[in-house]
Amino acid sequence: MRKIIRKNDSRLSRENLCNPFPNSTLQKRLISSGVIDYKDNCILEDLGNGYVKISAKDNSKRLR
């Protein structure tokens, strides 16, 4: 008789649990979540305490 070993691929490894998007790039994930594109679309406001507030000029402009 031959011993048959079956590998169970359904178990999640630590790497898969840490990163649920292993085959997706950051750009694709940002596009799918519908984030605002801040490139040439932002206003910088100095708060005077070393911090800067960034806000969008046009909120309807999304990343493509």
Image (cartoon, rainbow, N blue to C red):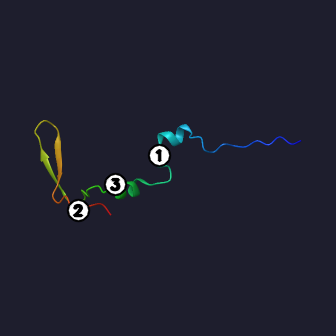
**Residue drawn at x 16%, y 45% as measured from the top left:** 53
Quadrant the N terminus occupies: top right
- Disc 1 marks which residue? 20
- Disc 2 marks which residue? 61
**Residue drawn at x 23%, y 62% as measured from the top left:** 61
Residue at the front extreme, as displayed: 1
Q: Look at the picture and state if 52 lies above or below 27.
A: above
Is 63 in front, or is 1? Answer: 1
Q: What residue type is disc 3 on?
A: Ser
Point out the tag, 2 or 1, that comes first from the N-terminus. 1
Distance from the alpha carbon under mark 2 to that under mark 1: 28 Å
Distance from the alpha carbon under mark 3 to that under mark 1: 15 Å
Residue at the right extreme, as displayed: 1
Looking at the image, residue 4 sits to the left or right of residue 36; the answer is right
Q: What residue type is disc 1 on?
A: Pro
Q: What element carries label 2?
A: loop
Residue 11: image location, x then y, percent: 59, 40
Residue at the left extreme, as displayed: 48
Q: What residue type is disc 2 on?
A: Lys
Number of other residues with Cα within 10 Å of mark 3, as a class: few under 14, some 14 to 19, many 20 or more: few
Nearest to viewer (mark 2 / mark 1): 1
Is 8 in front, or is 36? Answer: 8
Q: Look at the picture and state if 31 lies above or below 8.
A: below
- Disc 3 marks which residue? 33
Point out the tag, 3 or 1, that comes first from the N-terminus. 1
> CB under 8 Å between callouts 3 and 1?
no
Residue 41: image location, x then y, percent: 20, 59
Task: Check residue 56 in the rendering and tell me which mark sits there, or answer none.
Answer: none
User: In this figure, what is the number of numbered marks?
Assistant: 3
Q: Is mark 1 on a helix, strand or loop?
A: loop
